[in-house]
Amino acid sequence: MNSLQKSLIIINMTEKTLNHIRPFTDEPIRFIGSEGEPLFDFKPEDLSLNEEDLKTLYYYMKLTRAFDRKGMFLTRSGKALFYVEVAGQEASTVASGYAIPENDWIFPAHREHGVLIVRGYPLTEMFAQIMGRMEVNKARQMPVHWGMRKLRILTISSPVGNQLPQAVGIGMAINYLKKDEAIIVYTGDGGSSTGDFHSALTFASVFKTPVIFFVQNNHWSISVPIKRQYGSKNIAIKATAYGMEGYYIDGNDFLAVYATTKLAFEKAHNKEPVLIEALTYRYGSHSTADQADRYRDIKELEYWQKTWDPIKRAKLYLQGLGIWNENWEKELDEQIEHELNEAIDEAEKRPEPPPETTLEDVYAQMPWHIEEQMRELLDEIKGA
Amino acid sequence: MVFKLEEGEKAKSAKAITIVKAIREALAEEMRRDSRVVILGEDVGKRGGVFLATEGLIDEFGEERVIDTPLTELGIIGVAVGMALYGLRPVAEIQFIDFVYPGFDQIVNEAAKFRYRSGGQYSVPLVIRSPYGGGIGGGLYHSQSPESYFTHTPGLKVIIPSTPTDAKGLLKSAIRDEDPVIFLEPKKIYMSIKEEVPDDIDFTIEIGKAKKIKEGKDVTLISYGYMVHVCMKAVEIAQKEGISVELIDLRTLLPFDKDAILESVAKTGRLVIVNEAPKIGSFASEISAFVSERAIEYLLAPIKRITGFDTPFPYAQQKYYMPNEYRIYKAIKEVMEWN
């Protein structure tokens, strides 16, 4: 009995699919080509996906891209002070998010909007956070620093990579308490250079924790290209040094992302930590505080947009299956526009966090010195 | 003298234990009480820690709860943060606090800020305990007193005990606390001070309360950790010279006991603060600033800080570096004679 058969079977993919997902391949694992054409003889059912799943994935990818446009618009119109674009990485985030079992944990980094949207993070909450309105984290952090405990999404911070060992600690706690749960933790190509990455993979392999390390390799860490992040042939190969499996996948192929992440969860639930490197491309700048044209050749961007765009490829694949048409696309666009506008309107109606929230939640119980500062702040506001 | 613990009556009892033993008892009692408490660090398992603070715990609680880790402080603390986020009560040992810096980001940006940044959705009930301070010939990297890095970080609590009883009672409170606690243990006196310590499972000492070691009327002397014991010697010298010194052991630095400090200074009108750490930005400086803001009307003399030098901690020159009773006494005399 192999390890896959032992588990609770959270996946139901056929041998054909599983045989296609091999660790440490030289080329990225791909199910569909740049024109959405199947690269070998498989059907959606081989990935345990039905027509409804495919349409849902497509909807979420389009929603994520449209969300991005709204995020940029809110920043340009002064309603938000900052935004981080996810455009180009819709398959990587949405399809991995779609593969995460309901009870498992998510520790995102700063470019995982699609993962959160798929998990059901309310759009109003996301926009409220961006606009500094009252939301579940009380709007203390810069835009796109989301997190929601009831959805088992950890609240992210800004330093790159330091969530990785924490995810492993969650994995160790899951093991200690003998829970049948796992956690997926995201980072980028830059994050793979950190000491946190090394410590996390070391701990994960030594203690056999149910953790999936999902690296979105989008080619750029602000202005630094990937040739300055690693001298190895890719990032996935690094897993071999930790005694783990590393999967090098086409992050703009929603089927490859979905199937590999599903398989990784199967392994994680069997206490085999996994590293996934999803090769993708950041269309925008690092953030609204950056200008990619200062350091990046526009031709590179155009090549990725033209050849490997994840939404275009998904559309062509659905078209090939006969489940896409212009009318549906139009309906989707209208529905998404409506959903997003409604969420933004709702978010704008939210109040700003009250002044007390400046000083609350530092400790479980407020110590005397913060109480004093609270009185000073409230007096100042009263006096003003 | 009643305040000289190492020679006190309690120390003669067969039941008297050292600070290291008191810490071990605190850990064992809390682990028996609460299955969520786990220990992790380098050499904490079979070796029992390089100072034996965790000796024997692996035999009682197994390697699932007394976890020898890979050699990475950043990993130890990062992983411990994750365990705490999930609901465990990890106690991470950093072998010497001098080695904590690779994990500094995990403490300052993560453990300390998780509650705040998540709007109270998540918390990190984590204890990081570590030997600190000089006096054992440890040179630059086995002697440091970096408490001010942590007292400067909102979201952390910082505790430094000076006796076996305080070490035990405060460590138990730290493990039960809902927030991350930096628990620094004065290794110079790990084994040299003994006293009888309560063994009631629910014996704890409240975080944030100072302890008056000796009543006095002329000068307030504030310290913590090993320096409390050096201060005791200075108090004795002063007493022989007819100066009555009130000695306060802070025990908790963050949040510190403002009332104990202000009441004493209001009574004596003179203040000397002692810590081993370098002077600039030291916790002594914080207490000095606090008293200057709140109680200057009571002061009869300038506040004095007796601290380590603003240098790295040296090996062969340790005896010059560490504040001693004569330096402290000199400061006491200066504030008495100031006019």
Image (cartoon, coloured by chain):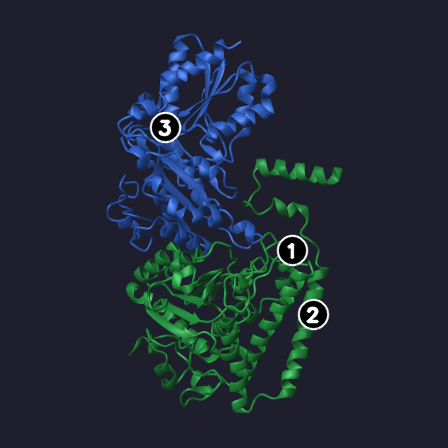
Same chain for marks 1 and 2? yes
Q: Tell whether A383 sits left or right of A193.
A: right
Q: In which quarter of the image is residue A2?
A: bottom left
Q: Position of residue B161 (x, y in %)?
A: 40, 32
Q: How far apart are marks 1 and 2 (CA)?
A: 17 Å
Circle 1 marks a residue in which chain?
A
Q: Is residue B235 above or below residue B177?
A: above
The hue in which chain A appears in the rendered picture of the protein: green
Q: Name the residue under label 1.
A: A132
Residue closer to the observer: A246 or B169? A246
Mark linked to residue A341: 2
Q: Where is residue B283 in the image (x, y as percent from the top left)?
A: 47, 31
**Which chain identifier belongs to the blue chain?**
B
- What type is the residue that disc 3 sits on? Tyr
Q: Where is residue B291 in the image (x, y as percent from the top left)?
A: 55, 24
Mark linked to residue A355: none
Q: Is residue B127 above or below residue A139?
A: above
